[in-house]
Amino acid sequence: MNIAFLAHDRKKDLMVQLCFAYKSILEKHTLCATNTTGKLISEATGMPVTLYLHANQGGAQQIGARISYNEIDLVIFLCDPKNKNGFDDVNSIERLCDQYQIPFATNIATAEVLILGLARGDLDYREYLRKK
């Protein structure tokens, strides 16, 4: 599965903790992220992460394009609800995930549920959808 990670600045440490905690699951998949988030994940876990531009330089749009081409199977975008200006990218990614039936988490609780579901095989249907 192809998993995309994005995080607002105040949620980057939480994203790293999530990826470290679930490394045994995530390392079996292909990971990509916006630049800073991806670097932090890779440095903390040793997992390879394909890096896109910083979010404010178009990284979220690059991930959005991969979603549009049905190349992403799961998106975790940890949002800071106190960041009043940071929701244009979240809303855009959310709409794309809805359009292409891609599981999408914006908080740690939902992210954990999706990662555990990934380990159980609950998201295997994405393999079929990606081949369409």
Image (spheres, helix red, strand yellow):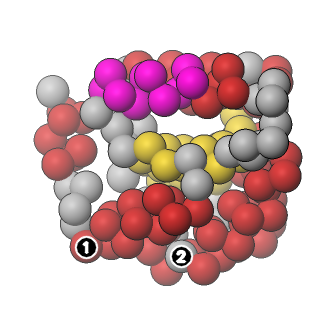
**Residue closer to the observer: 119 or 109:** 109
The mark total stands at 2
Is 97 in the magenta?
Answer: yes
Q: Which residues are magenta?
A: 91-100
The picture places residue 117, in percent across and down from the top left corner, at: 31, 66
Other-residue count near label 2 (Cα within 10 Å), few / some / many at <14 / 14–19 / ≥20: some
> Relative to residue 54, is residue 64 drawn left or right?
left
Q: Which residue: 80% across, 30% down? A: 84
Q: Label 1 is placed on what type of residue?
A: Arg
The picture places residue 25, in percent across and down from the top left corner, at: 44, 74
Vertical comparison of 127 with 86: above or below: below
SS at circle 1: helix
Is 130 in the magenta?
Answer: no
**Residue closer to the observer: 59 or 114:** 114
> Relative to residue 88, is residue 40 drawn left or right?
right
Q: Which residue is mark 1?
A: 120
**Residue closer to the observer: 62 or 47:** 62
Q: Which residue: 67% across, 20% down? A: 88
Residue 131 showing in the rendered view: yes
Q: Label 2 is placed on what type of residue?
A: Tyr
Residue 22 is marked as: 2
Tell me the CA gap for discs 2 and 1. 13 Å
Q: Which residue: 24% across, 44% down? A: 126
Other-residue count near label 1 (Cα within 10 Å), few / some / many at <14 / 14–19 / ≥20: few
Sequence-first tag of 2 and 1: 2
Residue 79 is marked as: none
Q: Which residue: 22% across, 66% down? A: 121
Could you say which quadrant of the image residue 97 lies in? top left
SS at circle 2: loop
Question: Which quadrant is the C terminus positioned in?
Answer: top left
The picture places residue 79, in percent across and down from the top left corner, at: 68, 45
